[in-house]
Image (tube, helix red, strand yellow):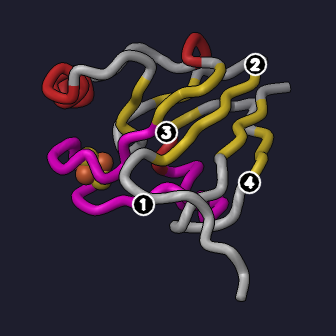
Amino acid sequence: MPKIEFEGSSAGRAKIVDRPEGGDLLDICDDVLAPIPFSCRSASCATCEVKVLEGIEFFEPPNDDEADLLGILGKKDHRIACQARIRSGGGFIRLRAVAVGPPVAAP
Ligand code: FES
């Protein structure tokens, strides 16, 4: 059963979700209010850049727009969350938002 773990960040709490059907990471993030920030949603700003800590093999290959932006960023094992697609099937994926800081401690 595929699982996606979103590390907590200043954009929200950590989440773990099951997505056996895979699909657009953007839709998954919207559905579960994942702690990944978005802005343009069109592969222009890199606000939604994520580091893939585990499970990059469970992603579909980048589309042209995502590949262009990843080429500009020049980082391995990163994906653009508004463009990336998750394969259906099994696996475990762990993601960390790049553009935001660690979780904010409760007062
Ligand atoms: S939200 Fe701007 S590149 Fe994804």
In the rendered structure, find residue 15 and report the number of the disc placed on it.
Answer: 4
- Where does residue 71 sit, x and y in percent of width and height? 18, 20
Above or below: residue 27 compared with residue 88: below
Instruction: Judge depth for marks 4 and 3 and give the one in front.
Output: 4
Could you say which is closer to the camera, residue 58 or residue 27? 58
Q: Mark 2 points at which residue?
A: 91
| Count of numbered marks | 4
Q: Residues within 10 Å of mark 1 (few under 14, many from 20)?
A: many
Give the percent coordinates (x, y) of residue 107.
71, 88
Q: Distance between the residues labelled 2 and 4?
A: 16 Å
| Badge number at residue 24 | 3
Return the residue nearer the eye: 8 or 101.
Answer: 101
Magenta stretch: includes residue 89: no
> Which span is picked out in magenta?
27-50
Q: Report the amino acid beneath label 2.
A: Gly
Amino acid under disc 4: Lys
Identify the image quadrant of residue 63.
top left
Q: Which amino acid does label 1 sit on?
A: Pro
* Cα gap from disc 3 to disc 2, whole angstroms: 16 Å
Q: Which residue is drawn at 22% across and 21% down?
A: 74
Q: Does the residue labelled 1 lie within 8 Å of ligand 1?
A: yes
Q: Do the residues labelled 1 and 3 touch (CB within 8 Å)?
A: no
